[in-house]
Image (spheres, rainbow, N blue to C red):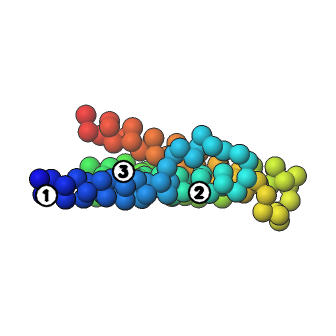
Amino acid sequence: MHLIRIMVVFFISGVLSSSHVVAKSNSDCLQHLGGGYGDAECYSELQKDLTVQSKFIYNKLRATMRNGNVHAKLLDEYMETQDASVRYCELPRNAGAKWKTEHDGSMFSALREECIYNLRKAQNQFLKDLLDMANW
């Protein structure tokens, strides 16, 4: 009986501690957007998670291709292009600020972070679809 209690305590502790780790970038924050700094933080954390996931999927995809394969080079170029495209997310932020490049820390940073999140989300889905096709 004592052993069962100890096991239950460890199980509950594990569940509680793992939920705190997930809470850092929990997609539930998307349901509580309000147009301020919290939005920027939400999008920022989620896009960082997507970037890590995409890198993992990329490595799995790359492992399915031989060195020197023309598709491996194309995949590498795709990843580089996606990384480079993040710089264009200054456009929606600056458009929302009437094209000013200096901001007062208002919601305009959320526009940039949302743009990056959307790019990373599309990239992640594209890579997942490729991996699914490669594993047929």
Dot 1 amino acid type: His
Taking the spot 36% from the left edge, 51% from the top edge, the residue there is: 57
Q: Where, by quadrant of the figure, is residue 17 drawn?
A: bottom left
Taking the spot 31% from the left edge, 58% from the top edge, the residue there is: 13
Dot 3 amino acid type: Ile
Residue 26 vs residue 80, the one in the foreground: 26
Locate residue 12 relative to residue 106 in the image: left or right. Answer: left
Locate residue 119 relative to residue 69 in the image: left or right. Answer: right
**Residue of label 1:** 2
In the picture, which quadrant includes the C terminus? top left
Residue 18 vs residue 100, the one in the foreground: 18
Q: Where, by quadrant of the figure, is residue 3 drawn?
A: bottom left
**Residue of label 3:** 57
**Residue of label 2:** 44
Nearer the viewer's eye, disc 3 or disc 2? Answer: 2
Q: Secondary structure at mark 1?
A: helix
